Amino acid sequence: MIPDEISIKQEWEELLERLKVHFGKKPDLNGVLFLIGIQELGQGVRNFSKEEKQDLMHIAVCKVLSYAGFYELEGTDKDGWPHWKPTAKLPFLNLKLQEELLKQHIIEYFRKEVFPEA
């Protein structure tokens, strides 16, 4: 592994442990994206339909990739759901590199938006 990969892996594990303390179980990547989606929707925790869960994951991916300039918030609809527009083409990445890109920007999201004191 290259040094950046080691750092991201370590920071990712630290983030998961911090979330485990808060939620009682260690989430996976999809669980973290779901949490970000709920946070960004800003309507609190409730029962979501399957379609809404997919939309929450999409919101999360757009939000975290906005840090890399791939998406920009367009606004919210009448129900308060955020809508994003692509601003740059995502590079073709294999699954491992896609996960690394997401993890890197999820870490950035939590640093800036959730745990700025850390």
Image (cartoon, rainbow, N blue to C red):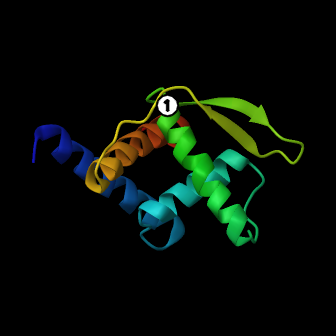
Image height of 36 relative to 64, above or below: below
Q: Tell me which residue sits at (57%, 48%) in the image.
A: 60
Outermost residue toward the left in this view: 1
- Residue depicted at 50% across the width and 64% down the height: 31
Q: Mark 1: few, some, or many residues within 10 Å (few <14, many ≥20)? A: some
- Residue 116 image point, x, y percent: 49, 35
User: What residue is at 82 percent from the left and 45 percent from the top?
Assistant: 80
Residue 10 screen position, x and y as percent: 23, 51
Front-most of residues 47 and 110 = 47
Q: Quadrant of residue 85?
A: top right
Please give the name of the residue rendered at 48% of the width and 63% of the height, measured from the top-left corner: 30
Q: Is residue 58 left or right of residue 76?
A: left
Disc 1 designates what residue? 70
Q: Secondary structure at mark 1?
A: loop
Residue 112 in view: yes
Q: Is residue 84 left or right of residue 66?
A: right
Whether residue 117 is visible: no
Q: Quadrant of residue 52?
A: bottom right
Name the residue type under label 1.
Phe
Q: Is residue 28 above or below residue 116?
A: below
Q: Nearer the viewer, residue 2 or 112?
A: 2
Residue 36 appears at what percent x and percent y? 57, 51
Quadrant for the C terminus in the image: top left
Is residue 26 found left or right of 44 in the rendered image?
left
